[in-house]
Image (cartoon, rainbow, N blue to C red):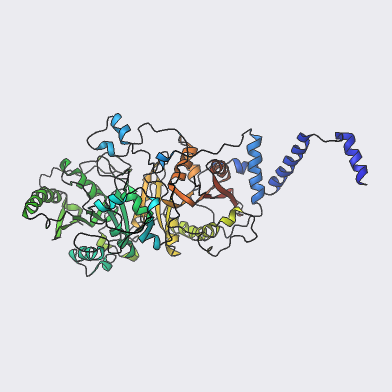
Amino acid sequence: MRSFWFNKLSVIFGPRPPVSWLLLCLVSLLALIAVLGSSSSNAFDSVTPTPVPDIYLNYRRLKEQAAVDYLELRSLSLGASRQRELGLCGKERENYVPCYNVSANLLAGFKDGEEFDRHCEVLRDRNRCLVRSPKDYKSPLRWPAGRDVIWSGNVKITKDQFLSSGSMTKRLMLLEENQIAFHSEDGLIFDGVKDYSRQIAEMIGLGSDSDFLQAGVRTVLDIGCGFGSFGAHLVSLKLMAVCIAAYEATGSQVQLALERGLPAIIGSFISRQLPYPSLSFDMVHCAQCGIVWDKKDGILLIEVDRVLKPGGYFVLTSPSGKLHGTAVGKRKRNVLTPMEEMTQEICWSLLAQQDETFIWQKTVDSDCYASRKQSAIPLCKEGHDVQSYYQPLVSCISGTSSKRWIPIQNRSAGSQLSARVLPDNFFEDLRVWRSALKNYWSLLTPLIFSDHPKRPGNEDPLPPFNMIRNVMDMNAHYGGLNAAFLEEKKSVWVMNVVPIRARNTLPLILDQGFTGILHDWCEPFPTYPRTYDMLHANGLLSHLSSESCSAIDLFLEMDRMLRPEGWVVLSDNVGAIEMARMLATQIRWEARVIDLQNGSDQRLLVCQKQFIKK
């Protein structure tokens, strides 16, 4: 019987069927599987914004391989050859941060300190390559051990820089040649961090620093944070302390803080506003941060007032006068005189002074500004800072007519959103992310990239699969993923990014006590390489599809921010996920497409960055 059919086929095709015919049969078979196992091809071609994902209960992967095969066949049918993997950048780019090229900024005409500011408009190097890790790079220790001990090879800093550091929060101990350990008491000139924090609490009338939350202090902007010791202590008190410091080519405060698992971002008080809306923080802290606040007619202090909430505190700790005698005391009084005049102009009151620490409190009464006599600082026009994305600094007072003008003392920890009119789908969004997070967490294991019989389940994988601390939500919407992390008691913090061309939900995110920032994803993000453990984006690729920015540049920037063995979770429609999967392969990520099995055209792309040692 076998020879009968073989002879029939030989008559038709000859003794050796053509290779092209065999390939055609294989392609047809795979295409048939894909068509039977998925929705119509129109669903794959659809590219529409999807701000909130559908609710789903599990990640059964019955149709996954068919969908993957379909994408590969579609790519072949369009005549697209497999993209070549990108090469590694040179060693000189191991700590590369775009938009902060001082030499290029000087050539472009920036001066008077502006050459140190962020300038993405200056021509960038178009050499597309993957930023490599330092030779001695190691995976960070799990939290909370990683807060106190880091690998010295992971950051660009020298022992001499540590020893010569005079900052109030910079003091460390080298345990071994390849480790840096931070004391829990590492650091102020007079006392330890805990004593300093307690001193600030007492100066604003609290019994101890554990009462900060009850007093309405939940979010703190720590300017020039040193190596993050004060912020680390505030985090232990359940406060959200965000370090912000200028770009530094070596010995970076921001890089050290992020390596310790503490929220931080590159930013400077030079010529532009910070990428935050008005009324964003409960406290702004500056301990020997190197800023002369009364220069430029006080415009830098006006920027602090802009981001400070009503009733919020500005804490300024200046260098010690005890070490230099009365001459410094006289100099101190001369410096503070214009500070006193300036703070009165912006309706701040000097609440307390102790040693070298001064605390001012912003008024809770918006009518205070109208009662000023012949003030040189006018009120800003309504709506002037709707989009505060690196706009030039302004000499006017913001936020006085905002609906968010709510004194921090009037807001208890359990009712921080009670005074706001919340969007109709706010709580539905949170319910979605509660479900989604459980599914995400179960997928973050290398097993997802193999054919291992043990599939990811609902339980947390064992270490080191979920070694995650620094998380970025690249299209944060209402901050629902952040809220879900907190409810699940995951030891992570989330940088909630709101794209500048999306609906500006950052005020709502900040009012929940979270941290976040406005950002244009056509530009690089203000952080150092290898500073995030997980990147998440829901609907971002669809959102950016109508813009002129390059998709490959976005993925290269994601790779720069992501630490080796870090995770990427993208949720979008199939057309966007198809593109993302090809780009992920090009930048050497392990990638897996997940069909949500809910009847929609939504897909997940789960990726892990490889640890390339070269």
Left or right? Give the position of 286 relative to 437: left
Residue at position x 25%, y 58% from top? Answer: 407
Which residue is outermost to the front? 177
For this rendering, which residue is in front, 589 or 200? 589
- x and y, in percent, of residue 326 in the image: 6, 55
For this rendering, which residue is in front, 353 or 361? 353
Residue at position x 32%, y 32% from top? Answer: 104
Tell me if I can see residue 373 in this picture: yes
Which residue is outermost to the bottom? 207
Q: Quadrant of residue 106?
A: top left
- x and y, in percent, of residue 36 in the image: 71, 48
- x and y, in percent, of residue 234 in the image: 30, 62
Q: Is residue 411 above or below residue 255?
A: below
Tell me if I can see residue 261 in this picture: no
Residue at position x 74%, y 41% from top? Answer: 26
For this rendering, which residue is in front, 156 or 559? 156
Left or right? Give the position of 283 relative to 33: left
Left or right? Give the position of 140 relative to 337: right
- x and y, in percent, of residue 62 in the image: 66, 55
Looking at the rendered structure, the number of numbered marks drawn on it comes to 0
Left or right? Give the position of 220 relative to 537: left
